[in-house]
């Protein structure tokens, strides 16, 4: 499992393409929002949180799309399937690697969005990092599973968002709400049930992905 | 499927060819007659309330379809039986149709009663997300072009989709729960005090359930014939 994480991270360290393109794309998405939606109205914690999650979802999908392309193109897929390891660990390894990419992007993006679109009413509380981690874990869990599935079809670029966005809907609703609360400095008792929802989502779909990968990798 | 498949006999099957269409026809006809001619108008909402005799059952069948897709998907992953896969596909297609009808009949009622075609009420939000999940499931199958691996992936998605429902229910409740929706009451029981109304409600439910079952069975048969045809075509090519 950690071997896969190391492999993906060292490819990234040498080329740097994933993070660079993810970050540039996310910046562009923010600019597009600002141009098309009158920047003066996009202020306050709700907008910063909403923008962070839509941007992360849109640009993160592209990263996740690439996730299994190398394996498919270079024949490593078969090697992975033949490897004498639990397939669930392959899934977890891939998910952790993707999680690290997405988390890095989120950490870079959040201050940028806040800076570009005004910091009115923003007083971060310790809940902010918790909500971001819980949200990103969910995106990585679903994204990794579906990206492995979509990489098999000819229309994978379209299929991945098509499969993952609807399933991610409850996570997105919860992540946007808790991040906004975290930015506004709210306390845990105000958004406790939201945090449980996010945590529940992560646990359910990490388990589902881990179990389902047996069927996904079988060729 | 082996190459020595015999052509299907042309005789009628008693349940799926005779009983099921007949029961569907009779109960749907009875439901339409009751809903449009016999039941009285609901006191507060008037004539538009009659759409509930269909709308509410469509909602249940939308969920039921989802659960069936998940069950058949699990069955397919366990056994690899093509029948299980065909049932999953058929339920997804008919489920999508019924969800579409639910999204169609809902606004027809909402416009005169709530004053808007659409509102971000928890149930509405959830329905539209379920609709997209059904659609994505069918898109995956379409783009996979009958590849056996894709059938397995579709089964995984069918199960993931049903796991998403409770989380979705929770999310939309928390999300919109604080703001009371513009509804008066969408509880059908509130208006169904009259015995005729309850009969109409029950009969239309039975009718729609038969319709759902019949459509699924037709769709499964179509998929089976399609598969046999593909096998025959392949055999002919080899000759």
Image (tube, coloured by chain):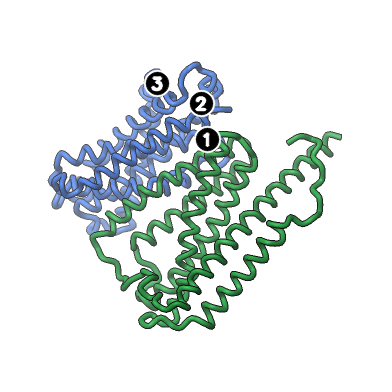
Chain colours: A blue, B green
Looking at the image, which is closer to me, A155 or A169?
Answer: A169
At mark 1, the secondary structure is loop
Give how far across and how far down residue B26 sits, in percent.
Answer: 63, 70
**Residue ID at (30%, 36%):** A105
Specify whether residue A23 is in view: no
Relative placement, left or right, of A26 versus B33 is left
Label 2 to label 3: alpha-carbon separation: 15 Å
Give how far across and how far down residue A8 sits, in percent.
Answer: 40, 24
- Residue A43 to residue B236: above or below: below
- Mark positioned earlier in the residue sequence (1 or 2): 2
Which of the two marks, 1 or 3, is nearer to us in this view? 3
Q: Which residue is mark 3?
A: A1
- Mark positioned earlier in the residue sequence (2 or 3): 3
**Mark 2 — on which chain does it sit?**
A
- The single residue placed furthest to the front in the displayed view is B195
Tell whether label 2 touches label 1 (CB within 8 Å): yes
Give how far across and how far down residue A184 sits, in percent.
Answer: 15, 49
At mark 3, the secondary structure is loop
Q: Which quadrant would the C terminus of chain A be assigned to in this image?
A: top right
**Residue ID at (46%, 55%):** B63
Looking at the image, which is closer to me, A26 or A143?
Answer: A143
Tell whether label 3 touches label 1 (CB within 8 Å): no
**Residue ID at (60%, 42%):** B84
**Residue ID at (60%, 51%):** B90
Label 1 to label 2: alpha-carbon separation: 10 Å
Q: Which residue is mark 1?
A: A151
Q: Which residue is mark 2?
A: A71
Q: Residues within 10 Å of mark 3 (few under 14, many from 20)?
A: some
Specify whether residue B155 is in view: yes
- Residue B66 to residue B115: above or below: above
Which of the two marks, 2 or 3, is nearer to us in this view? 3
């Amino acid at each position: 499992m950690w071997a896969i994480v190391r492999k993906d991270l060292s490819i990234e360290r040498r080329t740097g393409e994933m993070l660079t393109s993810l970050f540039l794309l996310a910046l562009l998405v923010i600019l597009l929002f600002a141009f098309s939606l009158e920047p003066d109205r996009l202020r306050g914690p709700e907008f910063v949180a909403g923008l962070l999650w839509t941007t992360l979802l849109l640009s993160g999908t592209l990263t996740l799309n690439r996730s299994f392309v190398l394996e498919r193109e270079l024949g490593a897929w078969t090697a992975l399937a033949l490897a004498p390891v639990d397939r669930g660990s392959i899934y977890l390894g891939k998910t952790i690697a993707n999680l690290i990419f997405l988390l890095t992007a989120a950490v870079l993006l959040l201050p940028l969005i806040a800076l570009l679109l005004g910091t009115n009413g923003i007083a971060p509380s310790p809940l902010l990092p918790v909500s971001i981690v819980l949200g990103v874990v969910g995106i990585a869990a679903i994204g990794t599973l579906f990206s492995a599935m979509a990489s098999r079809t000819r229309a994978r670029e379209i299929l991945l968002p098509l499969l993952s966005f609807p399933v991610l809907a409850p996570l997105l609703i919860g992540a946007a709400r808790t991040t906004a609360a975290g930015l506004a400095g709210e306390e845990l008792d105000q958004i406790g049930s939201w945090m449980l929802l996010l945590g529940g989502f992560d646990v359910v779909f990490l388990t589902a992905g881990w179990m389902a990968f047996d069927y996904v990798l079988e060729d | 499927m082996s190459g020595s498949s015999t052509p299907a006999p042309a005789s009628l099957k008693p349940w799926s060819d005779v009983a099921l269409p007949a029961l569907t026809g009779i109960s749907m006809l009875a439901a339409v007659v009751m809903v449009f001619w016999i039941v009285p108008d609901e006191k507060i909402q008037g004539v538009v309330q009659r759409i509930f005799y269909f709308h509410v059952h469509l909602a249940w069948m939308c969920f039921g379809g989802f659960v069936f897709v998940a069950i058949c998907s699990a069955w397919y992953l366990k056994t690899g039986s093509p029948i299980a896969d065909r049932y999953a596909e058929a339920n997804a297609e008919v489920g999508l149709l019924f969800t579409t009808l639910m999204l169609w009949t809902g606004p027809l009622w909402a416009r005169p009663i709530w004053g808007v075609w659409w509102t971000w009420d928890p149930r509405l939000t959830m329905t539209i997300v379920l609709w997209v999940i059904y659609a994505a499931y069918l898109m995956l199958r379409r783009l996979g072009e009958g590849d056996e691996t894709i059938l397995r992936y579709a089964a995984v998605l069918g199960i993931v989709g049903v796991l998403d429902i409770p989380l979705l229910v929770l999310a939309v409740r928390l999300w919109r729960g604080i703001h009371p929706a513009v509804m008066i009451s969408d509880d059908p029981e509130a208006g169904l005090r009259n015995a005729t109304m309850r009969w109409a409600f029950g009969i239309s439910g039975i009718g729609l359930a038969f319709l759902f079952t019949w459509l699924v069975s037709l769709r499964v048969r179509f998929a089976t014939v399609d598969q046999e045809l593909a096998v025959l075509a392949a055999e002919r090519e080899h000759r």
